[in-house]
Amino acid sequence: MGMNEVKENEVKEYVKKRYSEIAQSGESCCTPSCCNTSIADVALRIGYSEEDLKDIPEASSMGLGCGNPVALAGLREGETVLDLGSGGGIDVFLAAKKVGAKGKVIGVDMTEDMVNKARSTALKYGYENVEFRLGEIENLPLKDGSVDVIISNCVINLSPDKEKVFREAYRVLKPNGRLLVSDIVTEGELPEDVKKSFDAWAGCIAGALEKNQYLNTIIRTGFEKVEIVSQSTYDIDLSQELKGKITSVQVEAYKN
């Protein structure tokens, strides 16, 4: 095992531990300093509407995103949707209402406590068109060409191997399938001390790629019509040195 693999495994284990703690405690935040803000307030600030939050189980909203990909995905009845890094299930439950009984939404998360929490919520509230699977987004537990749409909310930046994530996304999408993700990117390079901080990795910052590098990674894996459909400066509870350097983007891409 090379040094890079050792580092990647360390990052994964740290992120998994952090999100297990969030699942167990119910206290969460994407950035390390935002924990004085209510989860509902964070959800509203990152793009969910009050109507969205009324439509889904409260337990699924954990204030962990950086946008609302479901609002932009234009989901249609009967579609099969995959949520990468589904956490407590907020986007899965929102998507489930859009695709209806003939559709299906699959959430994949590497944190067992998150998957168990989401499954329990689905059972409690009677969701029959959702499924939560334990797995890594770099190695998806799905067949080739099995989903119509892939969504993800502030998760891919946590992966140490983003190219592998997008290759897997391309693999499991049907021909003409689409990808629509909210994520964090940087404007220019981040300071080295931030990049090396495990806390910043788990807080959705240090793993972020530079914006053009992020888009080029998606293109390199075979996607077409790759474009940013929406973006905004992400300054929620960031330190002064990071203000203006972090951007929340919503990216759309298609499999040919």
Image (cartoon, helix red, strand yellow):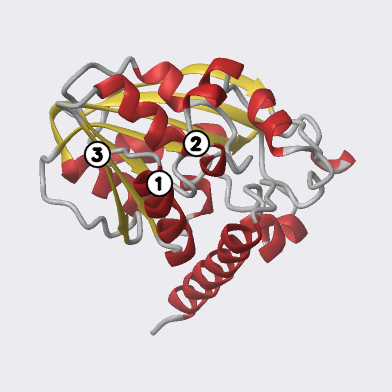
Q: Position of residue 126 (x, y in %)?
A: 32, 39
Residue extending farthest right? 240
Marks 3 and 1, how far apart at CA? 11 Å
Image disc number at residue 124:
1
Marks 1 and 2, how far apart at CA? 9 Å
The residue beneath circle 3 is 128
The residue beneath circle 2 is 57
Mark closest to the chain's N terminus, 3 or 2: 2
Q: Quadrant of the C terminus?
A: top left
Residue at 49 percent of width and 46 percent of height: 155
Residue at 10 percent of width and 40 percent of height: 145
Q: Position of residue 122 (x, y in %)?
A: 37, 45
Q: Are marks 3 and 2 in contact (CB under 8 Å)?
A: no
- Is residue 219 toward the left or the right of residue 118 in the image? left
Mark closest to the chain's N terminus, 1 or 2: 2
Helix, strand or loop at mark 3: loop
- Is residue 78 toward the left or the right of residue 105 in the image? left
Q: Position of residue 240 (x, y in %)?
A: 89, 39
Q: Quadrant of the N terminus?
A: bottom left
